[in-house]
Amino acid sequence: MFVLLATLWGGSFTAIEVGLHYFPPLAFAGVRYAIAGAVILGYAAYATDRWRPRTREEYLAVGVVGALVIAGYHGLLYLGERRVSGAIAAVVVSLAPVLTAGFAAAVLDERLGLTEGLGFALGIAGVAVVAGFDPTSALSTSVVGVGLVLLGAACFALGGVLTRPLRTDLPAAALQAWSMLGGAALLLGWGALRGESLSAIRPTPTALASLAYLTLLSGVVAFLLYFRLLDRIGPTKLHLVGYLEPVVATLAGWAVLGEVVSASTVAGFAAIFAGFAVLHRDAMRSLAASVRPTALAASLRRSALAAASDRPLGRDGSGDEESEPTEGAWSSSAGHADD
Protein backbone atom coordinates (compact mmCIF):
# COMPACT_ATOMS: atom_id res chain seq x y z
CA MET A 1 0.00 0.00 0.00
CA PHE A 2 2.89 2.35 0.81
CA VAL A 3 4.52 1.82 -2.60
CA LEU A 4 1.18 2.14 -4.38
CA LEU A 5 0.44 5.41 -2.57
CA ALA A 6 3.86 6.81 -3.52
CA THR A 7 3.31 5.71 -7.12
CA LEU A 8 -0.11 7.34 -7.39
CA TRP A 9 0.99 10.60 -5.77
CA GLY A 10 4.35 10.67 -7.57
CA GLY A 11 2.65 10.21 -10.93
CA SER A 12 0.30 13.10 -10.17
CA PHE A 13 3.11 15.63 -10.66
CA THR A 14 3.53 14.48 -14.26
CA ALA A 15 -0.25 14.32 -14.77
CA ILE A 16 -0.51 17.94 -13.59
CA GLU A 17 2.27 18.97 -15.96
CA VAL A 18 0.45 17.32 -18.87
CA GLY A 19 -2.98 18.67 -17.95
CA LEU A 20 -1.78 22.26 -17.66
CA HIS A 21 -1.55 22.36 -21.46
CA TYR A 22 -5.36 22.09 -21.57
CA PHE A 23 -6.65 23.63 -18.31
CA PRO A 24 -6.21 26.98 -16.60
CA PRO A 25 -4.18 26.07 -13.49
CA LEU A 26 -6.51 27.04 -10.65
CA ALA A 27 -9.63 25.88 -12.48
CA PHE A 28 -7.82 22.58 -13.10
CA ALA A 29 -7.15 22.08 -9.38
CA GLY A 30 -10.66 23.27 -8.45
CA VAL A 31 -12.47 20.88 -10.79
CA ARG A 32 -10.25 18.02 -9.63
CA TYR A 33 -11.06 18.49 -5.96
CA ALA A 34 -14.73 19.27 -6.49
CA ILE A 35 -15.16 15.83 -8.08
CA ALA A 36 -12.86 14.00 -5.66
CA GLY A 37 -14.48 15.67 -2.65
CA ALA A 38 -17.96 14.64 -3.76
CA VAL A 39 -16.86 11.02 -4.26
CA ILE A 40 -15.09 10.80 -0.87
CA LEU A 41 -18.04 12.46 0.86
CA GLY A 42 -20.29 9.74 -0.57
CA TYR A 43 -17.85 7.13 0.73
CA ALA A 44 -17.80 8.79 4.17
CA ALA A 45 -21.60 8.86 4.31
CA TYR A 46 -21.71 5.14 3.48
CA ALA A 47 -18.74 3.79 5.45
CA THR A 48 -18.44 5.98 8.57
CA ASP A 49 -20.70 6.59 11.52
CA ARG A 50 -20.69 10.38 11.04
CA TRP A 51 -20.12 12.37 7.88
CA ARG A 52 -20.95 15.94 8.95
CA PRO A 53 -18.97 18.24 11.26
CA ARG A 54 -20.77 19.33 14.44
CA THR A 55 -18.49 21.23 16.76
CA ARG A 56 -16.74 24.53 16.31
CA GLU A 57 -13.34 22.81 16.29
CA GLU A 58 -14.46 20.41 13.57
CA TYR A 59 -15.61 23.27 11.35
CA LEU A 60 -12.35 25.06 12.09
CA ALA A 61 -10.33 21.97 11.13
CA VAL A 62 -12.26 21.70 7.84
CA GLY A 63 -11.60 25.39 7.15
CA VAL A 64 -7.87 25.18 7.88
CA VAL A 65 -7.34 22.06 5.77
CA GLY A 66 -9.50 23.41 2.94
CA ALA A 67 -7.81 26.81 2.85
CA LEU A 68 -4.18 25.78 3.36
CA VAL A 69 -3.74 22.11 2.44
CA ILE A 70 -6.17 21.98 -0.50
CA ALA A 71 -6.45 25.52 -1.90
CA GLY A 72 -3.14 27.06 -0.82
CA TYR A 73 -0.88 24.10 -1.50
CA HIS A 74 -2.46 22.90 -4.74
CA GLY A 75 -3.11 26.35 -6.15
CA LEU A 76 0.55 27.34 -5.74
CA LEU A 77 1.73 23.92 -6.93
CA TYR A 78 -0.26 24.14 -10.16
CA LEU A 79 0.93 27.70 -10.77
CA GLY A 80 4.51 26.64 -10.08
CA GLU A 81 4.36 23.68 -12.44
CA ARG A 82 3.76 26.06 -15.31
CA ARG A 83 7.41 27.09 -14.83
CA VAL A 84 9.19 23.95 -13.58
CA SER A 85 8.88 20.24 -14.30
CA GLY A 86 6.83 17.86 -12.20
CA ALA A 87 10.00 16.09 -11.01
CA ILE A 88 11.48 19.31 -9.64
CA ALA A 89 8.15 20.21 -8.04
CA ALA A 90 8.06 16.79 -6.33
CA VAL A 91 11.55 17.35 -4.91
CA VAL A 92 10.58 20.75 -3.50
CA VAL A 93 7.36 19.38 -2.00
CA SER A 94 9.41 16.72 -0.19
CA LEU A 95 10.60 19.59 2.05
CA ALA A 96 7.13 19.74 3.66
CA PRO A 97 7.97 17.50 6.67
CA VAL A 98 11.04 19.66 7.38
CA LEU A 99 8.93 22.81 7.20
CA THR A 100 6.41 21.18 9.51
CA ALA A 101 9.07 20.94 12.21
CA GLY A 102 9.90 24.61 11.75
CA PHE A 103 6.28 25.73 11.97
CA ALA A 104 5.70 23.51 15.00
CA ALA A 105 8.59 25.24 16.76
CA ALA A 106 7.25 28.68 15.87
CA VAL A 107 3.52 28.13 16.38
CA LEU A 108 3.31 25.40 19.02
CA ASP A 109 6.51 26.25 20.91
CA GLU A 110 7.94 22.81 20.22
CA ARG A 111 11.66 22.69 20.92
CA LEU A 112 13.95 23.09 17.91
CA GLY A 113 17.48 22.54 19.16
CA LEU A 114 20.83 22.83 17.42
CA THR A 115 20.53 19.42 15.73
CA GLU A 116 17.00 20.14 14.55
CA GLY A 117 18.18 23.53 13.28
CA LEU A 118 20.84 21.74 11.24
CA GLY A 119 18.21 19.48 9.72
CA PHE A 120 16.05 22.47 8.82
CA ALA A 121 19.03 24.26 7.26
CA LEU A 122 19.92 21.19 5.20
CA GLY A 123 16.38 21.08 3.82
CA ILE A 124 16.37 24.74 2.84
CA ALA A 125 19.83 24.40 1.27
CA GLY A 126 18.54 21.47 -0.76
CA VAL A 127 15.75 23.60 -2.23
CA ALA A 128 18.26 26.33 -3.09
CA VAL A 129 20.36 23.76 -4.95
CA VAL A 130 17.31 22.45 -6.83
CA ALA A 131 16.33 25.98 -7.84
CA GLY A 132 19.86 26.77 -8.98
CA PHE A 133 19.51 29.98 -7.01
CA ASP A 134 21.80 32.79 -8.13
CA PRO A 135 21.32 36.37 -6.81
CA THR A 136 21.92 37.68 -10.34
CA SER A 137 19.00 35.65 -11.71
CA ALA A 138 16.63 35.65 -8.74
CA LEU A 139 13.63 36.32 -10.97
CA SER A 140 14.34 33.61 -13.52
CA THR A 141 11.49 31.34 -14.57
CA SER A 142 12.81 28.31 -12.70
CA VAL A 143 13.48 30.22 -9.47
CA VAL A 144 9.98 31.75 -9.50
CA GLY A 145 8.46 28.33 -10.20
CA VAL A 146 10.40 26.72 -7.35
CA GLY A 147 9.40 29.64 -5.11
CA LEU A 148 5.70 29.12 -5.85
CA VAL A 149 5.95 25.38 -5.14
CA LEU A 150 7.91 26.11 -1.96
CA LEU A 151 5.17 28.46 -0.75
CA GLY A 152 2.67 25.71 -1.52
CA ALA A 153 4.67 23.22 0.55
CA ALA A 154 4.75 25.79 3.36
CA CYS A 155 0.93 26.06 3.22
CA PHE A 156 0.70 22.27 3.44
CA ALA A 157 3.04 22.15 6.44
CA LEU A 158 1.35 25.05 8.24
CA GLY A 159 -2.08 23.50 7.74
CA GLY A 160 -0.89 20.29 9.36
CA VAL A 161 0.54 22.16 12.35
CA LEU A 162 -2.53 24.35 12.90
CA THR A 163 -4.86 21.35 13.02
CA ARG A 164 -2.83 19.55 15.73
CA PRO A 165 -4.38 21.35 18.73
CA LEU A 166 -7.91 20.90 17.38
CA ARG A 167 -9.82 18.10 19.07
CA THR A 168 -12.17 16.40 16.65
CA ASP A 169 -13.88 13.02 16.42
CA LEU A 170 -14.93 13.60 12.81
CA PRO A 171 -13.77 10.61 10.71
CA ALA A 172 -10.75 11.38 8.54
CA ALA A 173 -12.61 10.63 5.31
CA ALA A 174 -15.39 13.09 6.17
CA LEU A 175 -12.90 15.76 7.23
CA GLN A 176 -10.97 15.34 3.99
CA ALA A 177 -14.11 15.34 1.83
CA TRP A 178 -15.48 18.61 3.26
CA SER A 179 -12.01 20.16 3.07
CA MET A 180 -11.74 19.17 -0.59
CA LEU A 181 -15.10 20.72 -1.41
CA GLY A 182 -14.31 23.91 0.47
CA GLY A 183 -10.84 24.07 -1.05
CA ALA A 184 -12.29 23.53 -4.54
CA ALA A 185 -14.62 26.50 -4.05
CA LEU A 186 -11.66 28.66 -2.97
CA LEU A 187 -9.59 27.51 -5.95
CA LEU A 188 -12.37 28.28 -8.44
CA GLY A 189 -12.93 31.69 -6.84
CA TRP A 190 -9.20 32.43 -6.89
CA GLY A 191 -9.07 31.40 -10.53
CA ALA A 192 -11.98 33.71 -11.39
CA LEU A 193 -10.11 36.62 -9.79
CA ARG A 194 -7.14 35.77 -12.04
CA GLY A 195 -9.41 35.89 -15.07
CA GLU A 196 -9.61 32.13 -15.56
CA SER A 197 -12.72 30.66 -17.15
CA LEU A 198 -13.99 27.10 -17.40
CA SER A 199 -14.70 27.81 -21.07
CA ALA A 200 -10.94 27.92 -21.64
CA ILE A 201 -10.69 24.18 -20.90
CA ARG A 202 -9.86 22.07 -23.97
CA PRO A 203 -11.42 18.63 -23.29
CA THR A 204 -9.11 16.52 -25.44
CA PRO A 205 -8.62 12.81 -24.66
CA THR A 206 -5.26 13.63 -23.07
CA ALA A 207 -6.82 16.34 -20.91
CA LEU A 208 -9.61 14.04 -19.73
CA ALA A 209 -7.12 11.25 -19.01
CA SER A 210 -5.05 13.63 -16.90
CA LEU A 211 -8.12 14.83 -15.00
CA ALA A 212 -9.37 11.25 -14.47
CA TYR A 213 -6.00 10.15 -13.08
CA LEU A 214 -5.76 13.12 -10.70
CA THR A 215 -9.38 12.86 -9.57
CA LEU A 216 -9.95 9.13 -9.23
CA LEU A 217 -6.52 7.57 -8.71
CA SER A 218 -4.41 10.30 -7.13
CA GLY A 219 -7.43 11.90 -5.47
CA VAL A 220 -9.89 9.23 -4.32
CA VAL A 221 -7.93 5.94 -4.26
CA ALA A 222 -4.72 7.50 -2.92
CA PHE A 223 -6.47 9.35 -0.09
CA LEU A 224 -8.29 6.19 0.99
CA LEU A 225 -4.92 4.40 1.03
CA TYR A 226 -3.52 7.32 3.04
CA PHE A 227 -6.24 6.99 5.71
CA ARG A 228 -5.57 3.24 5.99
CA LEU A 229 -1.80 3.68 6.27
CA LEU A 230 -2.15 6.51 8.77
CA ASP A 231 -3.84 4.11 11.16
CA ARG A 232 -1.38 1.28 10.54
CA ILE A 233 2.07 2.92 10.52
CA GLY A 234 1.57 6.41 11.97
CA PRO A 235 2.31 9.88 10.55
CA THR A 236 6.12 9.96 10.87
CA LYS A 237 6.74 6.79 8.85
CA LEU A 238 4.02 7.81 6.43
CA HIS A 239 5.95 11.06 5.79
CA LEU A 240 8.56 8.88 4.08
CA VAL A 241 6.15 8.45 1.18
CA GLY A 242 7.13 12.00 0.19
CA TYR A 243 10.66 10.80 -0.51
CA LEU A 244 9.56 8.07 -2.88
CA GLU A 245 7.29 10.44 -4.82
CA PRO A 246 10.17 12.38 -6.51
CA VAL A 247 11.60 9.07 -7.74
CA VAL A 248 8.25 8.14 -9.28
CA ALA A 249 7.78 11.66 -10.67
CA THR A 250 11.25 11.54 -12.26
CA LEU A 251 10.60 8.16 -13.89
CA ALA A 252 7.14 9.26 -15.07
CA GLY A 253 8.52 12.51 -16.48
CA TRP A 254 11.21 10.60 -18.34
CA ALA A 255 8.80 7.94 -19.68
CA VAL A 256 5.95 10.29 -20.66
CA LEU A 257 7.67 13.59 -21.48
CA GLY A 258 11.28 12.61 -22.11
CA GLU A 259 12.56 14.77 -19.23
CA VAL A 260 15.96 14.18 -17.67
CA VAL A 261 16.70 15.32 -14.11
CA SER A 262 19.95 17.22 -13.56
CA ALA A 263 22.65 16.30 -11.06
CA SER A 264 21.86 19.42 -9.04
CA THR A 265 18.27 18.25 -8.56
CA VAL A 266 19.51 14.88 -7.27
CA ALA A 267 21.97 16.63 -4.92
CA GLY A 268 19.24 18.94 -3.64
CA PHE A 269 16.92 16.01 -3.01
CA ALA A 270 19.67 14.24 -1.05
CA ALA A 271 20.13 17.35 1.13
CA ILE A 272 16.37 17.61 1.76
CA PHE A 273 16.16 13.96 2.77
CA ALA A 274 19.22 14.39 5.01
CA GLY A 275 17.41 17.25 6.73
CA PHE A 276 14.37 15.04 7.30
CA ALA A 277 16.56 12.23 8.65
CA VAL A 278 18.21 14.59 11.14
CA LEU A 279 14.90 16.05 12.31
CA HIS A 280 13.29 12.62 12.70
CA ARG A 281 16.41 10.68 13.69
CA ASP A 282 14.65 8.75 16.46
CA ALA A 283 11.93 7.53 14.09
CA MET A 284 14.55 6.67 11.46
CA ARG A 285 16.51 4.60 13.99
CA SER A 286 13.31 2.84 14.99
CA LEU A 287 12.48 2.14 11.35
CA ALA A 288 15.99 0.80 10.69
CA ALA A 289 15.75 -1.44 13.74
CA SER A 290 12.39 -2.81 12.61
CA VAL A 291 13.75 -3.60 9.14
CA ARG A 292 17.04 -5.15 10.26
CA PRO A 293 15.63 -8.37 11.81
CA THR A 294 13.64 -9.09 8.65
CA ALA A 295 16.74 -8.68 6.51
CA LEU A 296 18.72 -10.89 8.90
CA ALA A 297 16.03 -13.57 8.79
CA ALA A 298 16.06 -13.56 5.00
CA SER A 299 19.86 -13.91 5.04
CA LEU A 300 19.62 -16.83 7.49
CA ARG A 301 17.05 -18.55 5.31
CA ARG A 302 19.21 -18.16 2.17
CA SER A 303 22.22 -19.57 4.04
CA ALA A 304 20.20 -22.53 5.33
CA LEU A 305 18.82 -23.30 1.88
CA ALA A 306 22.31 -23.13 0.40
CA ALA A 307 23.61 -25.48 3.07
CA ALA A 308 20.68 -27.85 2.50
CA SER A 309 21.39 -27.97 -1.23
CA ASP A 310 24.96 -29.14 -0.54
CA ARG A 311 23.86 -31.79 2.04
CA PRO A 312 24.01 -35.49 0.96
CA LEU A 313 20.67 -37.17 0.39
CA GLY A 314 19.14 -39.31 3.14
CA ARG A 315 17.56 -42.72 2.81
CA ASP A 316 14.32 -41.35 1.34
CA GLY A 317 16.05 -39.04 -1.15
CA SER A 318 15.67 -35.94 1.03
CA GLY A 319 18.26 -34.17 3.15
CA ASP A 320 19.90 -35.82 6.14
CA GLU A 321 17.09 -36.51 8.58
CA GLU A 322 19.00 -35.57 11.72
CA SER A 323 20.15 -32.18 10.48
CA GLU A 324 17.12 -31.21 8.39
CA PRO A 325 15.59 -28.02 9.85
CA THR A 326 12.05 -28.44 11.12
CA GLU A 327 9.10 -26.14 10.52
CA GLY A 328 9.39 -24.99 14.11
CA ALA A 329 13.01 -23.99 13.50
CA TRP A 330 11.98 -21.82 10.55
CA SER A 331 9.30 -20.13 12.62
CA SER A 332 11.56 -19.42 15.57
CA SER A 333 14.38 -18.01 13.47
CA ALA A 334 12.41 -16.11 10.86
CA GLY A 335 9.40 -14.89 12.81
CA HIS A 336 5.91 -13.98 11.66
CA ALA A 337 6.98 -11.58 8.93
CA ASP A 338 8.98 -14.21 7.09
CA ASP A 339 6.27 -16.84 7.61
Image (cartoon, rainbow, N blue to C red):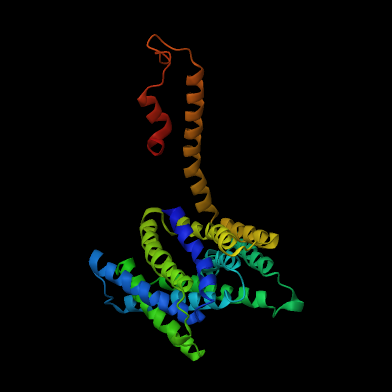
Q: Which residue is rendered at x = 60% and y = 69% of the image?
A: 85
Which quadrant would residue 38 be assigned to in this image? bottom left
Q: Which residue is rendered at x = 41% and y = 36% of the image?
A: 338
Q: Nearer the viewer, residue 95 or 55?
A: 95
User: Furthest-right residue in view?
Assistant: 136
Residue 40: where, in percent of width, then height?
32, 69
Which quadrant would residue 126 be assigned to in this image? bottom right
Residue 69: where, in percent of width, then height?
45, 74
User: Furthest-front residue in view?
Assistant: 205
Q: Which residue is rendered at x = 61% and y = 61% of the image?
A: 272
Q: Nearer the viewer, residue 260 or 52?
A: 260
Task: Indicate whether 24 appears above or below 233.
Answer: below
Left or right: 242, with 174 as reference point: right
Left or right: 277, with 169 as reference point: right
Which quadrant would residue 317 be assigned to in this image? top left
Residue 131: where, in percent of width, then height?
67, 70
Number of marks in the rendered image:
0
Left or right: 58, with 217 as reference point: left
Quadrant holding the C terminus? top left
Instruction: Answer yes or no: is residue 179 visible.
Output: no
Q: Nearer the viewer, residue 21 or 328?
A: 21
Q: Nearer the viewer, residue 336 or 196?
A: 196
Task: Indicate whether 148 appears above or below 6.
Answer: below
